[in-house]
Amino acid sequence: MQRWKVGLGLVVAAVATAVAGSAIRHEGMVAGHAETAATPPQVMAMPVPVAPVVKKAIAVYYEYSARTEAIRGIALQPRISGYIQSQDAADGSDVNEGDLLYTIDPRDVQAALDQAKAQAQRDRATLEYARSNLNRGAALSRSGFIAKDTYDQRASASVAAEAALAMDEAAIRTAELNLNYAQIRAPFSGRLGRNQASIGTLVSPGGGALNTLVQLSPIYVTFNPSETELTEIQRARTAGSVTADILVPGSDQPPRRGELIFIDNTVDRSTGTIVARAMIANADRTLLPGQYVRVRISLRELPDAMMVPQAALGSSQFGKYVYVVGQGSKVEQRLVSLGPTDGDLVAVLNGISEGDSVISGNLQKIGPGMPVQPLSDKHATATQ
């Protein structure tokens, strides 16, 4: 019994010692943790490129994909029958109004003209005799030497001779027109296409076309604004002429300038767009009908626009935003509304002011409240 009491005492003493040691270790850990929390580690400032807000006046415009379209384009067809005698303008050549393009063998129509002139000469002689006979009959009829019916016959013959001569003169004009049609000339300045009738081919008015001719200067540019943009375009047209700048993809030439001249009277119900057309000069005739281009319609000017690099824009579920270097060189997030673009810059309608420094790089590595080290664009480029 005494042994049992002694063993129990030893166990109680060991447990007390263990509890005391655990308490001492716990106090040490709490003290160490408190000391660590009291001195947090220093956060390194992230170097970021910044760009100033640029205040400038910019043009507000809409830009569309477009196709060029010839103002006039025709198929050259013969108006008389005959054999092609010559092709007087080469395939694909630029011609002026009135230039000779094709010649049809004129001998048949020349013979028809000569025949009509001979017929007219004969009928003119017949008319002269009929008029002289009528004049003599008038005097004889008044004196009673010829019957009234005979005089009427002479009058009728004179009228018939006049009608026959008029028909001859019409036939002459027709033959002269046909002779002119033997020479096919350009009705307007433009460019020929590929020849469809070789020399010696028998052609006729009901046959195929000899060639095509399209006008290249000036030229139309056709595009399709949406119905939501139509109101602002019409407002700009009401205020004055609307400028259209034409950009040719792959070309290093400056934009060609023209003017918006036409908006259709019906919106396409299936697409919600409307046909619009600009006209531009094409003096060098390098633009061809059906060519793909970009058209930029200038609507108005936006004065004092706040411009930032497009690379500074970020997106979230709340919309577009930019990061700005705030007080203490810490990041501030600003939600913004965007306006038109101008090259690599975009207009910000609200959310920033002229004196702000906008962060234009390392956007994925920073967040609101983080300290940053602002670098100018040149310095940031040099350190990369």
Image: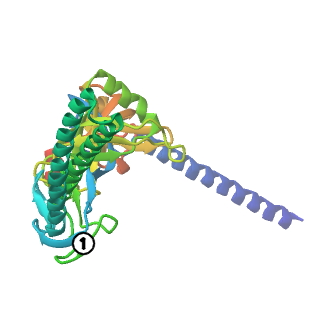
* Residue closer to the observer: 87 or 158: 158
Indicate the position of residue 268 as horizontal and vertical percent values.
Answer: 50, 43
Indicate the position of residue 22 as horizontal and vertical percent values.
Answer: 62, 54
Indicate the position of residue 129 as horizontal and vertical percent values.
Answer: 17, 45
Colouring used for the render: rainbow
- Point 23% across, 35% down: residue: 137
> In the drawing, does residue 112 fall left or right of residue 61?
left
Indicate the position of residue 314 as horizontal and vertical percent values.
Answer: 38, 44
The quarter of the picture where residue 214 lies is bottom left
- Point 13% across, 69% down: residue: 87
| Circle 1 residues within 10 Å: few <14, some 14–19, many ≥20 | few
User: Which residue is at the far right?
Assistant: 1
Q: Which residue is mark 1?
A: 196
Q: Is residue 331 visible?
A: no
Specify the quadrant that holds the C terminus: bottom left
* Residue closer to the observer: 347 or 283: 283
Q: Is residue 151 visible?
A: yes
> In the drawing, does residue 97 fall left or right of residue 293?
left
User: Which residue is at the far top?
Assistant: 239
Specify the quadrant that holds the N terminus: bottom right
* Residue closer to the observer: 251 or 381: 251
Q: Secondary structure at mark 1?
A: loop
User: How many numbered discs?
Assistant: 1
Amino acid on which disc 1 is placed: Gln
* Residue closer to the observer: 104 or 151: 151
- Point 25% across, 67% down: residue: 81
